[in-house]
Amino acid sequence: MHPQSAHSPLQIAEPVAQALRDGTPVVALESTIISHGMPWPDNLQMAQRVEQTVRDSGATPATIAVMGGRWCVGLADEALERLARQGPATPKLSRRDLPLVTARGGDGATTVAATMIIAARAGIRVFATGGIGGVHRGAAQSMDISADLLELARSPVAVVCAGAKAILDLGLTLEVLETQGVPVYGWCTDELPAFYSRRSGLRLPCRVDSLDELAAALQLQWATGLGGGALVANPIPAAAEIPHESIAPVIDDALVQAAQQGIHGAAVTPYLLSRLNDLTVGRSLAANIELVLNNARVAAGLAAAWARLQPSLPIVPVASASR
Ligand code: PSU
Ligand code: MN
Protein backbone atom coordinates (compact mmCIF):
# COMPACT_ATOMS: atom_id res chain seq x y z
CA MET A 1 0.00 0.00 0.00
CA HIS A 2 1.29 3.45 -0.74
CA PRO A 3 0.14 6.59 1.02
CA GLN A 4 -2.53 7.81 -1.41
CA SER A 5 -5.98 8.46 -0.05
CA ALA A 6 -8.98 10.65 -0.74
CA HIS A 7 -7.72 13.12 1.86
CA SER A 8 -4.13 13.28 0.69
CA PRO A 9 -3.05 15.54 -2.18
CA LEU A 10 -0.48 12.91 -3.12
CA GLN A 11 -0.95 11.49 -6.61
CA ILE A 12 1.56 8.83 -7.56
CA ALA A 13 1.74 7.91 -11.25
CA GLU A 14 1.27 4.21 -11.92
CA PRO A 15 4.84 3.31 -12.99
CA VAL A 16 6.18 4.97 -9.84
CA ALA A 17 3.56 3.33 -7.59
CA GLN A 18 4.40 -0.03 -9.14
CA ALA A 19 8.15 0.43 -8.52
CA LEU A 20 7.47 1.46 -4.91
CA ARG A 21 5.28 -1.59 -4.36
CA ASP A 22 7.90 -3.85 -5.91
CA GLY A 23 10.75 -2.24 -4.00
CA THR A 24 12.67 -1.45 -7.19
CA PRO A 25 14.82 1.73 -7.39
CA VAL A 26 13.08 5.10 -7.82
CA VAL A 27 14.70 8.52 -8.31
CA ALA A 28 12.80 11.75 -7.61
CA LEU A 29 13.44 14.76 -9.88
CA GLU A 30 12.47 18.39 -9.30
CA SER A 31 10.51 20.74 -11.55
CA THR A 32 11.78 24.25 -10.71
CA ILE A 33 14.89 23.47 -12.72
CA ILE A 34 12.54 22.92 -15.69
CA SER A 35 10.31 25.97 -15.30
CA HIS A 36 12.72 28.50 -13.79
CA GLY A 37 16.20 27.07 -14.29
CA MET A 38 16.46 26.72 -18.07
CA PRO A 39 14.91 28.31 -21.18
CA TRP A 40 12.42 26.60 -23.51
CA PRO A 41 12.97 24.25 -25.34
CA ASP A 42 16.27 23.18 -23.72
CA ASN A 43 14.34 22.67 -20.47
CA LEU A 44 12.04 20.04 -22.00
CA GLN A 45 14.93 18.25 -23.69
CA MET A 46 16.84 18.25 -20.40
CA ALA A 47 13.85 16.89 -18.46
CA GLN A 48 13.29 14.10 -20.97
CA ARG A 49 16.99 13.20 -21.13
CA VAL A 50 17.25 13.08 -17.35
CA GLU A 51 14.25 10.76 -17.10
CA GLN A 52 15.73 8.54 -19.83
CA THR A 53 19.12 8.50 -18.08
CA VAL A 54 17.45 7.33 -14.87
CA ARG A 55 15.67 4.56 -16.81
CA ASP A 56 18.85 3.54 -18.66
CA SER A 57 20.54 3.30 -15.25
CA GLY A 58 17.90 0.84 -14.03
CA ALA A 59 15.62 3.07 -11.94
CA THR A 60 12.15 4.62 -12.34
CA PRO A 61 12.13 8.43 -12.66
CA ALA A 62 9.56 10.40 -10.66
CA THR A 63 9.46 14.05 -11.69
CA ILE A 64 7.57 15.97 -9.03
CA ALA A 65 5.32 19.04 -9.47
CA VAL A 66 2.03 20.38 -8.13
CA MET A 67 -0.76 20.21 -10.73
CA GLY A 68 -4.31 21.31 -10.00
CA GLY A 69 -3.58 21.06 -6.28
CA ARG A 70 -2.33 17.46 -6.56
CA TRP A 71 1.18 16.59 -5.44
CA CYS A 72 2.14 14.70 -8.58
CA VAL A 73 4.89 12.13 -8.30
CA GLY A 74 5.73 11.08 -11.84
CA LEU A 75 4.50 13.24 -14.72
CA ALA A 76 2.95 12.14 -18.01
CA ASP A 77 4.73 13.37 -21.15
CA GLU A 78 2.04 16.04 -21.79
CA ALA A 79 2.31 17.41 -18.25
CA LEU A 80 6.10 17.60 -18.52
CA GLU A 81 5.82 19.46 -21.83
CA ARG A 82 3.20 21.88 -20.48
CA LEU A 83 5.41 22.70 -17.51
CA ALA A 84 8.43 23.27 -19.76
CA ARG A 85 6.48 25.44 -22.24
CA GLN A 86 4.94 27.61 -19.52
CA GLY A 87 8.35 28.28 -18.00
CA PRO A 88 8.37 30.88 -15.21
CA ALA A 89 4.59 31.44 -15.62
CA THR A 90 4.21 28.45 -13.29
CA PRO A 91 4.95 29.64 -9.75
CA LYS A 92 8.06 28.36 -7.97
CA LEU A 93 7.03 26.52 -4.81
CA SER A 94 9.09 26.01 -1.70
CA ARG A 95 7.89 24.62 1.66
CA ARG A 96 6.05 27.82 2.64
CA ASP A 97 4.09 27.89 -0.62
CA LEU A 98 2.69 24.35 -0.58
CA PRO A 99 -0.40 24.77 1.65
CA LEU A 100 -2.18 27.62 -0.13
CA VAL A 101 -1.41 26.51 -3.70
CA THR A 102 -2.69 23.04 -2.78
CA ALA A 103 -5.85 24.46 -1.16
CA ARG A 104 -6.53 26.59 -4.24
CA GLY A 105 -6.02 23.67 -6.60
CA GLY A 106 -3.19 25.53 -8.33
CA ASP A 107 -0.07 24.51 -10.22
CA GLY A 108 3.51 24.92 -9.12
CA ALA A 109 7.06 23.90 -9.88
CA THR A 110 8.74 22.40 -6.83
CA THR A 111 12.17 23.53 -5.62
CA VAL A 112 14.58 21.13 -3.97
CA ALA A 113 12.86 21.79 -0.62
CA ALA A 114 9.31 21.16 -1.85
CA THR A 115 10.41 18.17 -3.95
CA MET A 116 12.05 16.59 -0.87
CA ILE A 117 8.82 17.00 1.11
CA ILE A 118 6.68 15.34 -1.55
CA ALA A 119 9.23 12.60 -2.32
CA ALA A 120 9.42 11.71 1.37
CA ARG A 121 5.60 11.49 1.58
CA ALA A 122 5.64 9.13 -1.38
CA GLY A 123 8.34 6.94 0.20
CA ILE A 124 11.11 7.92 -2.24
CA ARG A 125 14.53 8.23 -0.59
CA VAL A 126 16.79 9.34 -3.43
CA PHE A 127 16.51 12.56 -5.45
CA ALA A 128 18.70 13.99 -8.21
CA THR A 129 18.99 17.68 -9.06
CA GLY A 130 21.54 20.14 -10.45
CA GLY A 131 22.61 22.28 -7.55
CA ILE A 132 20.80 23.00 -4.32
CA GLY A 133 19.97 26.50 -3.13
CA GLY A 134 22.21 27.81 -0.35
CA VAL A 135 23.48 30.89 1.43
CA HIS A 136 23.57 33.82 -0.97
CA ARG A 137 26.58 36.12 -1.01
CA GLY A 138 25.90 39.08 1.23
CA ALA A 139 23.44 37.01 3.28
CA ALA A 140 24.64 38.74 6.44
CA GLN A 141 22.66 41.73 5.09
CA SER A 142 19.92 40.11 2.97
CA MET A 143 19.29 37.04 5.19
CA ASP A 144 18.80 35.16 1.90
CA ILE A 145 19.40 31.54 2.87
CA SER A 146 17.59 28.96 0.75
CA ALA A 147 14.90 26.90 2.43
CA ASP A 148 16.61 23.94 0.71
CA LEU A 149 19.21 23.91 3.49
CA LEU A 150 16.65 23.69 6.29
CA GLU A 151 14.67 21.06 4.41
CA LEU A 152 17.79 18.92 4.18
CA ALA A 153 17.67 18.83 7.98
CA ARG A 154 14.01 17.74 8.00
CA SER A 155 12.95 15.42 5.18
CA PRO A 156 14.50 11.94 4.98
CA VAL A 157 15.78 12.10 1.40
CA ALA A 158 19.29 11.88 -0.03
CA VAL A 159 19.86 14.67 -2.57
CA VAL A 160 22.47 14.06 -5.27
CA CYS A 161 23.75 17.39 -6.60
CA ALA A 162 26.87 19.02 -8.06
CA GLY A 163 27.28 21.13 -4.93
CA ALA A 164 25.51 24.39 -4.33
CA LYS A 165 25.24 26.78 -7.22
CA ALA A 166 28.42 28.78 -7.80
CA ILE A 167 26.45 32.03 -7.54
CA LEU A 168 26.25 31.37 -3.76
CA ASP A 169 28.63 31.68 -0.85
CA LEU A 170 29.74 28.04 -0.73
CA GLY A 171 31.70 28.34 2.52
CA LEU A 172 28.71 29.75 4.40
CA THR A 173 26.45 27.16 2.76
CA LEU A 174 28.63 24.40 4.28
CA GLU A 175 28.51 26.16 7.66
CA VAL A 176 24.70 26.17 7.69
CA LEU A 177 24.58 22.51 6.66
CA GLU A 178 26.92 21.69 9.53
CA THR A 179 24.82 23.68 12.02
CA GLN A 180 21.71 21.89 10.79
CA GLY A 181 23.39 18.50 11.21
CA VAL A 182 23.13 17.53 7.55
CA PRO A 183 25.64 14.88 6.42
CA VAL A 184 27.48 16.07 3.29
CA TYR A 185 29.14 13.22 1.43
CA GLY A 186 31.70 13.89 -1.28
CA TRP A 187 31.08 11.29 -3.98
CA CYS A 188 34.62 10.23 -4.97
CA THR A 189 35.89 13.68 -3.95
CA ASP A 190 37.39 15.35 -0.87
CA GLU A 191 36.05 18.77 -1.83
CA LEU A 192 32.69 20.42 -2.21
CA PRO A 193 32.15 20.69 -5.98
CA ALA A 194 31.27 24.17 -7.23
CA PHE A 195 28.49 23.33 -9.71
CA TYR A 196 30.08 24.42 -13.04
CA SER A 197 33.56 23.56 -11.71
CA ARG A 198 34.77 20.36 -10.09
CA ARG A 199 36.58 22.03 -7.23
CA SER A 200 35.85 24.79 -4.72
CA GLY A 201 38.88 24.49 -2.44
CA LEU A 202 36.47 23.70 0.44
CA ARG A 203 37.22 20.38 2.10
CA LEU A 204 34.34 18.09 3.02
CA PRO A 205 34.26 16.15 6.27
CA CYS A 206 33.56 12.86 4.52
CA ARG A 207 34.34 11.26 1.22
CA VAL A 208 32.58 8.10 0.01
CA ASP A 209 33.65 5.88 -2.88
CA SER A 210 31.03 3.12 -2.63
CA LEU A 211 27.30 3.44 -3.22
CA ASP A 212 26.64 0.45 -0.95
CA GLU A 213 28.46 2.21 1.86
CA LEU A 214 26.49 5.38 1.19
CA ALA A 215 23.20 3.45 1.28
CA ALA A 216 24.27 1.80 4.54
CA ALA A 217 25.00 5.21 6.09
CA LEU A 218 21.55 6.46 5.04
CA GLN A 219 19.91 3.32 6.41
CA LEU A 220 21.67 3.87 9.74
CA GLN A 221 20.74 7.56 9.81
CA TRP A 222 17.06 6.73 9.44
CA ALA A 223 16.97 3.51 11.47
CA THR A 224 18.59 5.21 14.46
CA GLY A 225 16.07 8.05 14.39
CA LEU A 226 18.61 10.71 13.46
CA GLY A 227 16.21 11.68 10.72
CA GLY A 228 16.64 14.43 8.17
CA GLY A 229 18.22 14.18 4.76
CA ALA A 230 21.72 14.05 3.34
CA LEU A 231 23.62 15.71 0.57
CA VAL A 232 25.64 13.71 -1.93
CA ALA A 233 28.03 16.07 -3.70
CA ASN A 234 28.98 14.79 -7.16
CA PRO A 235 31.40 16.86 -9.26
CA ILE A 236 30.52 17.75 -12.86
CA PRO A 237 32.33 15.48 -15.38
CA ALA A 238 35.74 16.92 -16.31
CA ALA A 239 34.84 17.18 -20.01
CA ALA A 240 31.87 19.46 -19.24
CA GLU A 241 33.33 21.67 -16.52
CA ILE A 242 33.88 25.41 -16.79
CA PRO A 243 37.07 26.21 -14.87
CA HIS A 244 36.64 28.45 -11.84
CA GLU A 245 38.85 31.17 -13.39
CA SER A 246 36.55 31.56 -16.41
CA ILE A 247 33.18 31.44 -14.63
CA ALA A 248 34.04 33.51 -11.52
CA PRO A 249 34.23 36.93 -13.25
CA VAL A 250 31.01 36.21 -15.15
CA ILE A 251 29.21 35.36 -11.91
CA ASP A 252 30.50 38.61 -10.40
CA ASP A 253 29.05 40.56 -13.36
CA ALA A 254 25.70 38.79 -13.05
CA LEU A 255 25.57 39.54 -9.33
CA VAL A 256 26.22 43.25 -9.95
CA GLN A 257 23.44 43.30 -12.53
CA ALA A 258 21.02 41.57 -10.16
CA ALA A 259 21.77 44.19 -7.50
CA GLN A 260 21.31 47.05 -10.00
CA GLN A 261 17.95 45.61 -11.08
CA GLY A 262 16.84 45.25 -7.45
CA ILE A 263 16.17 41.51 -7.87
CA HIS A 264 15.51 39.77 -4.58
CA GLY A 265 13.83 36.81 -2.90
CA ALA A 266 12.77 33.79 -4.97
CA ALA A 267 13.58 35.66 -8.21
CA VAL A 268 17.33 35.84 -7.50
CA THR A 269 18.33 32.29 -8.50
CA PRO A 270 16.36 32.18 -11.79
CA TYR A 271 17.63 35.67 -12.73
CA LEU A 272 21.28 34.77 -12.14
CA LEU A 273 21.04 31.46 -14.02
CA SER A 274 19.55 33.13 -17.06
CA ARG A 275 22.07 36.02 -17.00
CA LEU A 276 24.90 33.47 -16.83
CA ASN A 277 23.46 31.65 -19.80
CA ASP A 278 23.44 34.91 -21.82
CA LEU A 279 26.88 36.00 -20.65
CA THR A 280 28.50 32.63 -21.44
CA VAL A 281 26.58 32.27 -24.74
CA GLY A 282 25.02 29.02 -23.62
CA ARG A 283 28.10 27.41 -22.13
CA SER A 284 26.76 27.53 -18.58
CA LEU A 285 23.50 25.94 -19.76
CA ALA A 286 25.36 23.09 -21.48
CA ALA A 287 27.39 22.48 -18.31
CA ASN A 288 24.23 22.62 -16.19
CA ILE A 289 22.57 19.94 -18.35
CA GLU A 290 25.62 17.65 -18.22
CA LEU A 291 25.90 17.86 -14.45
CA VAL A 292 22.21 17.03 -13.99
CA LEU A 293 22.60 13.94 -16.20
CA ASN A 294 25.67 12.92 -14.21
CA ASN A 295 23.73 13.31 -10.95
CA ALA A 296 20.86 11.23 -12.35
CA ARG A 297 23.28 8.34 -13.02
CA VAL A 298 24.74 8.41 -9.51
CA ALA A 299 21.26 8.77 -7.96
CA ALA A 300 20.00 5.74 -9.90
CA GLY A 301 22.97 3.73 -8.61
CA LEU A 302 22.31 4.89 -5.07
CA ALA A 303 18.60 4.06 -5.38
CA ALA A 304 19.58 0.55 -6.50
CA ALA A 305 21.96 0.16 -3.54
CA TRP A 306 19.18 1.41 -1.24
CA ALA A 307 16.67 -1.05 -2.74
CA ARG A 308 19.12 -3.94 -2.18
CA LEU A 309 19.30 -3.05 1.51
CA GLN A 310 15.57 -3.09 2.10
CA PRO A 311 14.17 -6.32 3.51
CA SER A 312 11.69 -7.78 1.06
CA LEU A 313 8.11 -7.26 2.20
CA PRO A 314 6.32 -10.28 3.66
CA ILE A 315 4.00 -11.87 1.13
CA VAL A 316 0.43 -11.28 2.29
CA PRO A 317 -1.59 -14.48 1.87
CA VAL A 318 -4.55 -13.97 -0.48
CA ALA A 319 -7.85 -15.55 0.64
CA SER A 320 -8.44 -18.51 -1.59
CA ALA A 321 -11.64 -18.59 -3.63
CA SER A 322 -12.17 -22.31 -3.20
CA ARG A 323 -12.85 -23.97 0.16
N1 PSU B 1 19.61 23.70 -9.59
C1 PSU B 1 19.73 24.01 -10.91
N2 PSU B 1 18.83 24.89 -11.42
C2 PSU B 1 17.79 25.40 -10.66
C3 PSU B 1 17.68 25.06 -9.29
C4 PSU B 1 18.63 24.20 -8.82
O1 PSU B 1 20.64 23.52 -11.58
O2 PSU B 1 16.97 26.14 -11.19
C5 PSU B 1 16.54 25.57 -8.42
C6 PSU B 1 16.19 24.46 -7.42
O3 PSU B 1 14.82 24.21 -7.54
C7 PSU B 1 16.52 25.06 -6.05
C8 PSU B 1 16.21 26.49 -6.30
O4 PSU B 1 15.73 24.48 -5.04
O5 PSU B 1 16.81 26.71 -7.59
C9 PSU B 1 16.79 27.36 -5.20
O6 PSU B 1 16.08 28.55 -5.15
P1 PSU B 1 16.22 29.54 -3.89
O7 PSU B 1 17.66 29.96 -3.93
O8 PSU B 1 15.27 30.68 -4.17
O9 PSU B 1 15.83 28.75 -2.67
MN1 MN C 1 16.30 32.72 -1.49
Image: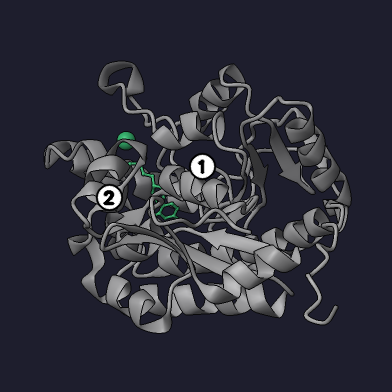
By what rule are the colours in the image chosen?
Answer: one colour
Image quadrant in which the N terminus is located: bottom right
Determine the quadrant in which ligand 2 lies: top left
Residue 56 image point, x, y percent: 69, 80
Report whether 27 appears left or right of 289.
Answer: right
Residue at 74% in and 68% down: 22
Question: Within 10 angstroms of label 2, few (less than 14), some, or many (20 or more) residues?
Answer: some
Q: Name the residue under label 2.
A: 102
Asked which secondary structure carries label 2, the reply is helix
Q: Are marks 1 and 2 in contact (CB under 8 Å)?
A: no
Taking the image as drawn, is residue 28 in sight? yes
**Residue at 59% across, 51% down:** 162
Between residues 145 and 155, which one lies in front from this camera angle? 155
Across and down, in percent, residue 139 comes to: 34, 23
> In the rendered view, would you say 59 is above or below 77?
above
Q: What residue type is labelled 1?
A: Ala
| Residue type highlighted by circle 2 | Thr
From the viewer's perspective, tell me whether residue 291 is left or right of residue 183: left
Above or below, comparing residue 72 to residue 50 in the picture: above
| Towards the viewer: 225 or 108 | 225
Residue shown at 56%/29% (left/top)?
153
Q: Residues within 10 Å of mark 1 (few under 14, many from 20)?
A: many
Q: In which quarter of the image is the C terminus?
A: bottom right
The residue under label 1 is 164
Q: Quadrant of residue 282?
A: bottom left
Labels 1, 2: front one: 2
